Image: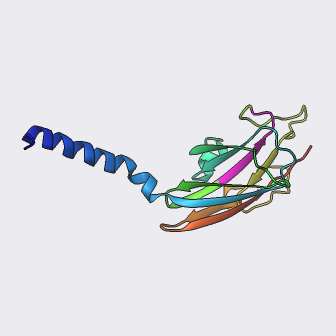
Amino acid sequence: MLQPVIVKALQVIVATLVISTSPSVLAQTVNIEITGLRSDKGQIVIGVFKNSESYLKEEPYINKIFSKELTQDGAKSVSFGLEPGIYGLCLLDDENGNGKMEYNFLGMPKEGFGFSDYYHSGIKKPKFDSFRFTIKKDETRNITIRIRYIL
């Protein structure tokens, strides 16, 4: 028979494991279809933003990085989990793999970019409300990001 101290320790360990794995159990699936990639060089960086303030400060809630391997005809599909809530996705086609957008001497982006279910045709950054979406509990969300290259 196990000692009461050992039983209590096992209960604490099991409770800790259940609590620490709960967020991943609660995560909803976001499937992203990326189109318009011009090469398979570099990586794809997706910044996940929760609100307009973090977007304007360029401080994502999380960054997801994906290899461009298995890119077919300029398209790639990726998936990850998010807890229910409001989000906006910003994609960088990081062709040189340095994790940041490259600009020319005029300040124009040299690498591709895109937003969740929104194709931005303007010169200035779009507003967060233009590409935000809501994901609900037990929902799988399908998002399309069409990449734009200025140069």
- Magenta range is 89-97
What's the colour scheme? rainbow
Vertical position of residue 85 compared to residue 148: above or below = below
Q: Position of residue 122 (x, y in %)?
A: 85, 54
Total number of numbered discs in the rendering? 0
Most distant residue in the front direction: 1
Q: Is residue 95 magenta?
A: yes
Which quadrant: the N terminus?
top left
Q: Position of residue 52 (x, y in %)?
A: 62, 52
The residue nearer to you, when weighing 31 against 49, is: 31
What residue lies at 87% left-to-right and 48% top-to-bottom?
38
The residue nearer to you, when weighing 49 against 43, is: 43
Which quadrant: the C terminus?
top right
Give the quarter of the image for residue 86: bottom right
Q: Position of residue 94 (x, y in %)?
A: 77, 39
Give the quarter of the image for residue 88: bottom right
Q: Is residue 15 left or right of residue 2?
A: right
Vertical position of residue 134 compared to residue 69: above or below = below
Q: Is residue 18 left or right of residue 143?
A: left
What residue lies at 68% left-to-right and 62% top-to-bottom?
143
What residue lies at 45% left-to-right and 53% top-to-bottom?
24
What residue lies at 57% left-to-right and 52% top-to-bottom?
50
Q: Is residue 95 left or right of residue 16?
A: right
Please tell me whether the stretch drawn in magenta is mainly helix, strand or loop.
strand
Q: Is residue 32 magenta?
A: no
Q: Position of residue 72 (x, y in %)?
A: 82, 54
